[in-house]
């Protein structure tokens, strides 16, 4: 059963076409992955499908009574309500039924079986109870606990106000609430952000058994392989549909490109052969009619466009102005936290030049806190830290909070490096896939992935050692 259809959808920003002629179908229990390079319009299309934005062209058709839930990337709950109260809101309808059932129970206990309203009240109660059972009324609190536990919220979090949680915790809580609402179509934009490996594995299993349809944007190919069964790709303003998960999509895309090149090269050979015949025979009286016939054949031929192949990928290196000593950073018996509250200890680090280190661990263990402590943004609670000779530091913030939303991409870099020639700034931005008029876009107009590339370009300009 088809729940939703997008027909000939287009989105434009001034003279620029983000995408057009978009066709998409979501059937019951569909598992759809939406992929494409940063800035292709994936998040914009999700907002149009969710009814948050209007398309510039085309129509959206949804089956009557179909419920739709949408969660934007990095959306977090932020209110004075407790974690438990926020989760209860996902079951508002069930709780209203429960409340009415309690009221009817009191009425039934207070009226006589001979009363004229007795049978009608019992009938109403039976109907409500059946609806309550169908909506998991007797098990919704257990369901809440299971989902909260899956997102690493144990009972110690239940009474905490949501506005006291970290940014990552608020994002996970928003996703938990959306799952508990169980819409017929669940639209998720980068749901794996801020998830550790344990939580990610839990989410994969939960979504595999989700009773509704799923439409997901994610850059995590392994997550898509586990969850989706069909893939839509936005590329060069157009959309294509492929059956299968992400890995299968890559295989089919490669096969498609090979087939396109084969057909294109075959036609080019045919065109070359016709043109050669025409050139040799058009002036000869004995063969001019055949040459004219070939020319008409060539004019009527529908020419294939040259296959465009894969889109460009960012290509860059981080250069440094001055090489550091062999010892980059040393920490002995360190502790991280806020004020007197210790998040993790003891921490011992010995980082040497040219080492590439991955910092992993569950949510809330203090990974970001440690990084901010190393760069001096948050002081170590205790421990002795030491930087080596000629060591300079810089930091990539996952929230891109250091970007000025009112500046253009070009100004964001040039204002911090005013003595650098514009051509060098543009060359750096070009290696991060910002070229031509792209550099005049406002930071506020960029997608999450594009902002990430601007942040990385800024880091590359700094030429720091660590």
Image: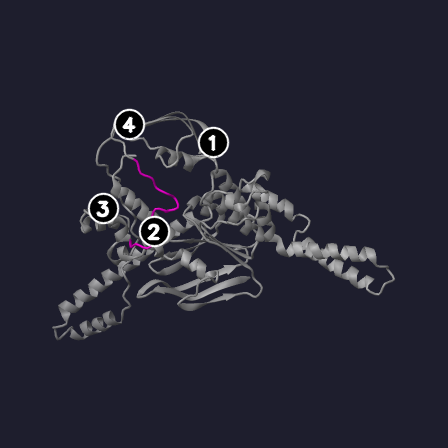
In percent of width and height, residue 340 lies at 47, 31
Q: Earlier in the sequence, mark 3 or mark 1?
A: 1
Q: Earlier in the sequence, mark 2 or mark 1?
A: 1
Q: Residues within 10 Å of mark 1 (few under 14, many from 20)?
A: few
In percent of width and height, residue 229 lies at 48, 51
Q: Is residue 298 magenta?
A: no
State how far apart marks 3 and 1 are (Cα): 39 Å
State how far apart marks 3 and 4 are (Cα): 26 Å
Quadrant in the rendering for residue 279: bottom left
Which numbered mark, 2 or 1, is in the foreground of this view?
Answer: 1
Q: Are marks 1 and 4 in contact (CB under 8 Å)?
A: no
Q: Earlier in the sequence, mark 3 or mark 4?
A: 4
For residue 336, above or below residue 205: above
Residue, disc 1: 340
Residue 391 visible in image: yes
Which numbered mark, 2 or 4, is in the foreground of this view?
Answer: 4
For label 2, the SS is: helix
Residue, disc 2: 450
Horizontal relation, residue 442 to residue 295: left or right: right
Residue 31 visible in image: no
Q: Is residue 397 magenta?
A: yes
Residue, disc 3: 417
Q: Earlier in the sequence, mark 1 or mark 4?
A: 1
For label 3, the SS is: loop
Residue, disc 4: 388
Q: Residues within 10 Å of mark 3 (few under 14, many from 20)?
A: some
State how far apart marks 3 and 2 are (Cα): 20 Å
């Amino acid at each position: 059963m088809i729940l939703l259809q997008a027909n000939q959808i287009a989105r434009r920003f001034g003279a620029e076409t983000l995408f057009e002629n978009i066709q998409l179908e979501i059937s019951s229990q569909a598992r759809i992955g939406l992929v494409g390079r940063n800035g292709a319009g994936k998040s914009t299309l999700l907002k149009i499908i969710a009814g948050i934005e209007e398309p510039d062209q085309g129509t959206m058709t949804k089956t009557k009574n179909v419920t739709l839930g949408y969660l934007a990337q990095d959306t977090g709950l932020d209110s004075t309500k407790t974690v438990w109260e926020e989760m209860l809101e996902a079951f508002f309808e069930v709780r209203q039924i429960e409340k009415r059932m309690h009221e009817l129970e009191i009425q039934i206990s207070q009226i006589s079986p001979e009363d004229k309203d007795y049978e009608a009240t019992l009938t109403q109660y039976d109907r409500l109870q059946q609806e309550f059972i169908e909506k998991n009324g007797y098990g919704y609190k257990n369901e809440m606990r299971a989902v909260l536990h899956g997102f690493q919220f144990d009972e110690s979090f239940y009474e905490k106000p949501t506005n006291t949680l970290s940014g990552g915790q608020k994002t996970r809580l928003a996703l938990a609430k959306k799952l508990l609402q169980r819409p017929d179509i669940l639209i998720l934009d980068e749901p794996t952000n801020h998830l550790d490996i344990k939580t990610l594995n839990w989410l994969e299993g939960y979504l595999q058994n989700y009773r509704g349809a799923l439409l997901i944007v994610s850059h995590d190919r392994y997550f898509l392989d586990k969850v989706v069964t069909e893939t839509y790709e936005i590329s060069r303003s157009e959309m294509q549909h492929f059956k299968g998960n992400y890995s299968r999509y890559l295989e089919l895309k490669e096969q498609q490109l090979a087939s396109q090149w084969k057909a294109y090269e075959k036609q080019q050979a045919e065109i070359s052969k016709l043109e050669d015949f025409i050139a040799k025979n058009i002036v000869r009286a004995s063969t001019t009619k055949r040459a004219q016939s070939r020319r008409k054949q060539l004019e009527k031929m529908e020419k294939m466009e040259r296959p465009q192949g894969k889109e460009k990928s960012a290509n860059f290196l981080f250069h440094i102005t001055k090489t550091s000593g062999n010892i980059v950073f040393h920490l002995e018996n360190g502790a991280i936290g806020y004020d007197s509250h210790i998040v993790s200890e003891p921490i011992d680090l010995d980082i040497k030049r040219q080492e590439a280190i991955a910092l992993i661990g569950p949510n809330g263990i203090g990974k970001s806190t440690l990084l901010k402590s190393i760069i001096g943004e948050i002081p170590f609670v205790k421990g002795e830290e030491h930087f080596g000779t000629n060591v300079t530091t810089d930091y990539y913030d996952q929230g891109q909070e250091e970007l000025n939303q009112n500046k253009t991409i070009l100004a964001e870099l040039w204002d911090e490096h005013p003595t650098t020639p514009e051509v060098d700034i543009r060359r750096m931005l070009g290696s991060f896939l910002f070229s031509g008029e792209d550099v005049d876009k406002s930071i506020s107009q960029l997608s999450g992935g594009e902002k990430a590339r601007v942040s990385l370009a800024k880091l590359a300009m700094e030429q720091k050692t660590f």
